[in-house]
Image (spheres, helix red, strand yellow):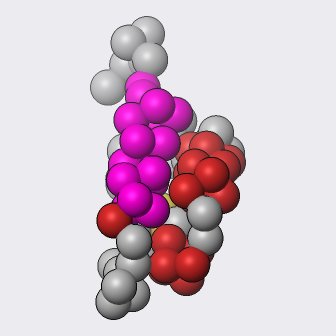
């Protein structure tokens, strides 16, 4: 429900070995799945960043979050 805070993640292995495009697509799919409806969703890395994960992959997740994870101003808090 709307009172529950959720954390969702992109697979640590996708962050490690996927392309930035695949990471953006995974983040977009997650963020457009309805998890943001309660306005209490945190996009995160799954709490396990694999050593030597490319920084450009983490940046891709971050940028996808900014692009697709915005809450509309019309929602009540």
Q: Residue at x 38, y 12 (%)?
A: 73
Q: Is residue 24 above or below residue 23?
A: above
* Residue 12 to residue 59: above or below: below
Tell me if I can see residue 14 in this picture.
Answer: yes
Q: Quadrant of residue 52?
A: bottom left
Q: Residue at the spot x=33%, y=89% of the render?
A: 51
- Residue range in magenta is 56-71
Where does residue 22 sit, x and y in percent of width and height?
66, 58
76 over 62 or under it: above or below: above
- In front here: 52 or 77? 52
User: Measured from the top left, where is residue 29 in percent x and y?
Assistant: 67, 48
Q: Nearer the viewer, residue 43 or 35?
A: 43
- Mark yes or no: residue 6 visible: no
Image quadrant in which the C terminus is located: top left
Image check: 33 left or right of 47?
right
Q: Position of residue 46 (x, y in %)?
A: 42, 75
Which of the 4 quarters of the picture holds residue 14? bottom right
Horizontally, residue 22 falls left or right of residue 68, namely: right
Which residue shows up at 52% across the image and 66% down it? Answer: 10
Q: How many marks?
A: 0
Residue 19: x, y in percent?
60, 63
Q: Quadrant of residue 58?
A: bottom left
The question of residue 70 being in magenta is answered with yes
């Amino acid at each position: 429900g709307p009172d529950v805070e959720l954390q969702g993640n992109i697979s640590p292995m996708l962050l490690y070995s996927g392309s930035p495009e695949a990471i953006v697509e995974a983040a977009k799919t997650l963020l457009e799945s309805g998890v943001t409806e309660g306005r209490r969703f945190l996009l995160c890395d799954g709490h396990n960043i694999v050593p030597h994960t490319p920084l450009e992959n983490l940046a891709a997740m971050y940028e996808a979050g900014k692009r697709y994870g915005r809450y509309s101003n019309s929602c009540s808090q």
